């Protein structure tokens, strides 16, 4: 299945405009490895990998967070995507499968290669000029050859208090779990492999 999405980090208006102009060509950016296999004791999933249903949690009141980094880890039985956050407050999320990647706000769709596609919305998001935190600047997309369930992670846009991203997966809607971690604040998504 080919899905569509935009490849835009929400760092600055100038960068945003440049990337939107670059997306018009229809070509995909080559994914790059950013995180390898996690070292140390075996990690446990962030939650029960029991189903592929959408997962939701409300953001804390007054949350103003910016995605500052995206990491990918491989663990026995699951692969992990970590959205690191800067700013203030407690993040919420909506994570669920979608048939195509559509950028919030613009409605633009773009090609993403993968067998299935998770849409990630981190709630309680704010623009970097509001949080005073530097936004994630790439690579976009990012991937790791050591994480077989994940074809690529894409940071799309910040729109109406949600930081939107997409995770292209190699499997047919595998089970997943979502949860928070702190010090620093993170939203973690574990995908069964």
Image (spheres, helix red, strand yellow):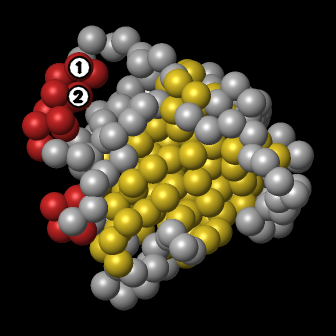
Please give the label number shown on residue 22.
Answer: 1
Residue 54 shows in this picture: no
Residue 148 location in percent, x, y? 76, 30
Of residue 100 and residue 174, the one placed in the foreground of this image is 174
- Residue under label 2, please give it: 19
> As drawn, is 12 to the left or to the right of 36?
left
- Quarter holding residue 7: top left
Please give the label number shown on residue 192.
Answer: none
Please report the residue visible at 39 percent of the width from the left and 36 percent of the height from the top.
Answer: 138
Question: Which image quadrant: the C terminus?
Answer: top right
Question: Which image quadrant: the N terminus?
Answer: top right
> As drawn, is 53 to the left or to the right of 188?
right
> As drawn, is 117 to the left or to the right of 148?
left
Of residue 131 and residue 166, the one placed in the foreground of this image is 131
Mark 2 neighbour density, 10 Å: few (under 14) some (14–19) many (20 or more):
some
Q: How many marks?
A: 2
Residue 93 shows in this picture: yes
- Quarter holding residue 122: bottom left
Please report the residue visible at 53 percent of the width from the left and 65 percent of the height from the top.
Answer: 186
Of residue 36 and residue 22, the one placed in the foreground of this image is 36
Residue 70 location in percent, x, y? 50, 47
Tag 2 secondary structure: helix
Q: Are marks 2 and 1 in contact (CB under 8 Å)?
A: yes
């Amino acid at each position: 299945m080919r899905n569509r999405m935009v490849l835009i980090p929400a760092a600055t208006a100038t960068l945003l405009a440049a990337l939107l102009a670059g997306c018009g060509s229809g070509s995909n950016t080559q994914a790059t490895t950013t995180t390898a296999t996690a070292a140390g004791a075996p990690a446990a999933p962030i939650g029960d990998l029991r189903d592929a249903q959408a997962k939701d949690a409300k953001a804390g009141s007054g949350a103003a967070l910016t995605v500052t980094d995206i990491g990918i880890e491989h663990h026995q039985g699951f692969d992990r995507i970590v959205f690191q956050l800067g700013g203030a407050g407690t993040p919420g999320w909506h994570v669920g499968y979608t048939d195509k990647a559509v950028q919030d706000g613009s409605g633009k769709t773009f090609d993403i290669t993968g067998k299935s596609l998770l849409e990630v919305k981190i709630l309680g998001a704010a623009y970097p000029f509001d949080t005073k935190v530097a936004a994630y600047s790439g690579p976009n997309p990012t991937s790791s050859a050591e994480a077989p369930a994940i074809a690529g992670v894409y940071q799309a846009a910040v729109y109406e208090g949600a930081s939107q991203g997409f995770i292209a997966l190699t499997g047919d809607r595998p089970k997943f779990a979502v949860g928070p971690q702190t010090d620093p604040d993170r939203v973690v998504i574990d995908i069964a492999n």
